[in-house]
């Protein structure tokens, strides 16, 4: 895939390429990295037996956001060649029996922390997208979304501290995605919970040091915190907070936030995470830029940083399965950034 232009967005060609990639892995059962606690010999089962829907894409959460990618490109580019295959797959996949199987898995005592919080956020992000389709999929899938919304409600009041990481444990990333569901579903109490929690965690954050990247991060912990608060705070309050959070950003400091990560070995699953870091930074910079006044000098700086990060990794969404099973979803987040959620 060629490098993106400064205004690169989701084109029919990119949508088709991403759809083909995801169709190739969401039902690919192996190789597979399970997040699964065995409470006895009977629990030693394969991915498809454990997860009737999300058994592919190397791991559960990647399968979830693979389906999000497919639903998203189908709605935004409905005439791509893969559209009929996506609809047929969704009709076959999102059935009451299969959703019941996923829900039943979560009823096991050992699954209390299953995919917390990364998979929780992605599952609700998927449901937000399904709600935008004229299809029965969202209604069928809703019981599973209800489980994860309930888990956020149970967990966040007990979460004294945020997880300021660049990997799956990031609370800012999960809440940012889950907030899209709260908006789409009209779940105002969930939005209130998210807002109260991120205020308690982050309103005192100042002059973020941006000690990143580490060697296997796929999220910018610094920018992800800002993007999470952007979604939840009133615009004027957010801009005041952001100015204190990254006070020298218009001068491209901290410099690391403006420098794409180097990916030395894309066959190494952990090192390949750094392509995801480039996409997540591009996503955050685009969203943050769109929230700033046109005259703010940081706006053009942020847009340029997003373009640089996209150019570094967009050609590499496919090629090795260690990246191919998930990277297109993060590229899509960046391509859609700055646009309305719907």
Image: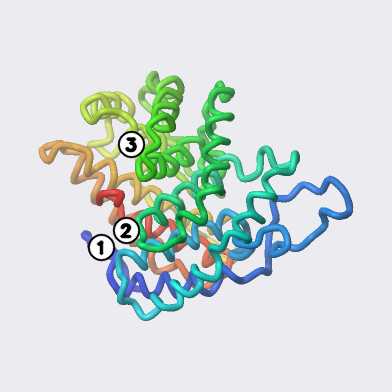
Q: Quadrant of residue 20?
A: bottom left
| Residues marked 2 and 1 touching at CB (< 8 Å) | yes
Q: Earlier in the sequence, mark 1 or mark 3?
A: 1
Q: Residue at x 48, y 47 (%)?
A: 124
Look at discs 2 and 3 and give the one toward the viewer.
Answer: 3
| Residues marked 1 and 3 touching at CB (< 8 Å) | no
Which quarter of the rendered picture does the N terminus lie within? bottom left
Of the pair 35 and 220, the residue shown nearer to us = 35
Q: Earlier in the sequence, mark 2 or mark 1?
A: 1
Q: Is residue 327 above or below residue 109?
A: below
Q: Which residue is mark 1?
A: 8
Q: CA distance from mark 2 to mark 1?
A: 7 Å
Q: Residue at x 26, y 28 (%)?
A: 234
Q: CA distance from mark 1 to mark 3?
A: 23 Å
Look at discs 1 and 3 and give the one toward the viewer.
Answer: 3
Image location (x, y in percent) of residue 336 = 31, 56
Q: Is residue 93 above or below residue 132?
A: below
Q: Quadrant of residue 62?
A: bottom right
Residue 231: mark in rendering: 3
Residue 278: mark in rendering: none
Image location (x, y in percent) of residue 226 = 36, 34
**Label 1: which secondary element:** loop
Q: CA distance from mark 2 to mark 3?
A: 18 Å
Q: Is residue 76 above or below residue 190?
A: below
| Left or right of residue 62: residue 255 | left
Q: Which residue is mark 2?
A: 335
């Amino acid at each position: 895939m060629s490098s993106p232009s400064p205004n690169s967005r989701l084109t029919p060609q990119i949508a088709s390429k991403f759809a083909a990639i995801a169709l190739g892995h969401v039902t690919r059962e192996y190789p597979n990295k399970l997040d699964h606690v065995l409470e006895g010999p009977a629990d030693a089962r394969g991915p498809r037996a454990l997860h009737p829907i999300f058994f592919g894409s190397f791991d559960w959460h990647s399968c979830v956001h693979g389906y999000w990618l497919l639903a998203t490109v189908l709605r935004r580019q409905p005439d791509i060649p893969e559209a009929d295959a996506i609809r047929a797959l969704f009709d076959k996949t999102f059935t009451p029996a299969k959703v019941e199987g996923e829900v039943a898995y979560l009823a096991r005592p050992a699954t209390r922390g299953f995919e917390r919080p990364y998979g929780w956020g992605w599952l609700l992000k998927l449901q937000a997208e399904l709600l935008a389709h004229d299809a029965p999929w969202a209604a069928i899938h809703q019981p599973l979304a209800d489980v994860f919304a309930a888990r956020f409600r149970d967990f966040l009041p007990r979460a004294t501290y945020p997880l300021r990481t660049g990997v799956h444990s990031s609370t800012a990333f999960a809440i940012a995605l889950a907030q899209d569901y709260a908006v789409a579903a009209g779940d105002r109490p969930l939005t209130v919970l998210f807002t109260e929690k991120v205020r308690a965690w982050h309103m005192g954050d100042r002059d973020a040091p941006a000690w990143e990247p580490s060697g296997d991060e796929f999220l910018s912990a610094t920018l992800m915190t800002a993007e999470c608060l952007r979604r939840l705070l009133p615009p004027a309050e957010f801009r005041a907070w952001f100015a204190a959070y990254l006070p020298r950003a218009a001068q491209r400091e901290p410099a690391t936030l403006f420098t794409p990560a180097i990916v030395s070995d894309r066959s190494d699953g952990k090192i390949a995470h750094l392509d995801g870091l480039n996409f997540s930074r591009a996503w955050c910079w685009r969203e943050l830029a769109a929230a700033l006044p046109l005259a703010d000098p940081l706006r053009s700086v942020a847009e340029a940083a997003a373009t640089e990060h996209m150019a570094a990794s967009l050609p590499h969404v496919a090629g090795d399965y260690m990246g191919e099973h998930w990277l297109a979803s993060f590229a899509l987040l960046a391509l859609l950034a700055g646009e309305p959620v719907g």
